Amino acid sequence: MLYRLLSIAILGAAVSSGAMAQDLAKHQFKVIGLNGPTVASIVDEVPFWRETLTKASNGAITADITPLDQMGVDDKTMLRMLRLGVMDFAGMDISKMAGDDPRFEGCDLAGLTLDADKARAACNAYRDVIDRQMQKNWNAKLLAFGGNPPQVFWCRTVVGGLADLEGKKIRVFNNTMRDFLNGVGATAVSMAFAEVVPALNNGVIDCAVTGSLSGNTAGWPEVAKSLYPMSLGWSINVMAVNLNTWKRLDKRTQEFMLEQVNAYEEKMWQTMKKAAAEADNCNTNKQPCTMGKPANITIVPVKPSEAVEHKKLVEGAVLAGWAKRCGPECAKEWNGTVGKSLGLSVPVN
């Protein structure tokens, strides 16, 4: 009897879901997404737009997605393009938008969290702030947060540890990483993801920061000899939609999209955890390595004394640097959201 009731319930849910999908108005969306070689793009974002959404909507919702590296655009301009309606939806590293508003790096300050669940909690605490700023100034609506494996140092030589970074030219992609490197006496170099391999190969830079598996899938082991796994964040991704596009959608389609996006967000965090867990295996030619490419990189362990120094840099140079850029009101709001969730505070004055 229980089995029969469960079967009826499941069938009813499927029919209800199918009916809802069949009732959806047809829409074709233009999407510019994350860097193509990254795990988040390969495993989650591209399949979501090309397969999952279309299947779940019974063909009513389709999308044309192009990873931003294939568009040849500066990823720091993604939010500006979304405001103008160049695309309907966009995937982007939110910290790269901080040149326009420092709040956009507020839940992923360099080294702020060393655990994926804490990183997610920090961004959830700041979700309303990010969405408010997007809607107020960028004609966009925040839909989802995701992440990448820990952002670590890939170096063209075998480094000895934190002290070896002093004096080196190191690629970063946001201001908060620059604050951290200033604290260790290194020179921060802003550089697009796609430019890193030739820059490392030619000695233009000594090291570069990216995800422990993102660098692997993008071919960085071909030009880097060591990986120093001191974390500088999670390269938090967001999905956002142009507000004009969103307001044109009927309520049923909006509800359908939110349901699908919530599932997509959950999947991104699970993918990130799996990628982070497999990164060391892939980078040292061990198994299981299902999400990356077998490589032979020397992983330089973070010493206990360096972990203590990392904490000092985060709570000193990183938090103070960001608070200065963001201003007193912004800092106060951060203390009541992200700071409260992590037990930290930034200087208000």
Image (cartoon, helix red, strand yellow):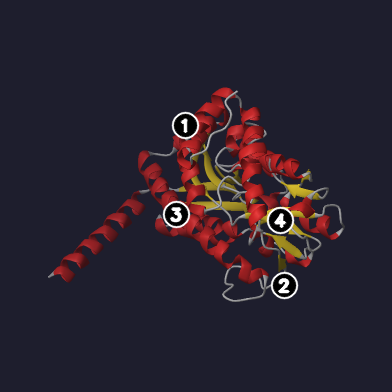
User: Which amino acid is tagged 2?
Assistant: Asn
| Residue 81 in view | no
Disc 3 on helix, strand or loop? helix
| Among numbered discs 3 and 1, the one appearing first in the sequence | 3
**What is the three-letter code of the residue carrying label 1?**
Gly
The mark lying in front, picked from 4 and 3, is 4
Q: Nearer the viewer, mark 1 or mark 2?
A: 1
Q: CA distance from mark 3 to mark 1?
A: 25 Å
Instruction: Give the quadrant of the N terminus.
Output: bottom left
Residue indicated by mark 2: 296
Q: Nearer the viewer, residue 39 or 257?
A: 39
Tag 4 near tag 1, CB within 8 Å = no
* Residue drawn where x is 44% and y is 54% of the image: 266
Image quarter of residue 284? bottom right
Q: Amino acid at mark 4?
A: Phe
Q: Residue at x 52, y 64 (%)?
A: 274
Sequence-earlier tag: 2 or 3: 3
Q: Is residue 14 above or below residue 310?
A: below
Residue 125, x across and y down, in percent: 46, 39
- In the figure, is residue 239 to the left or right of 35? left
Q: Which residue is mark 1?
A: 336
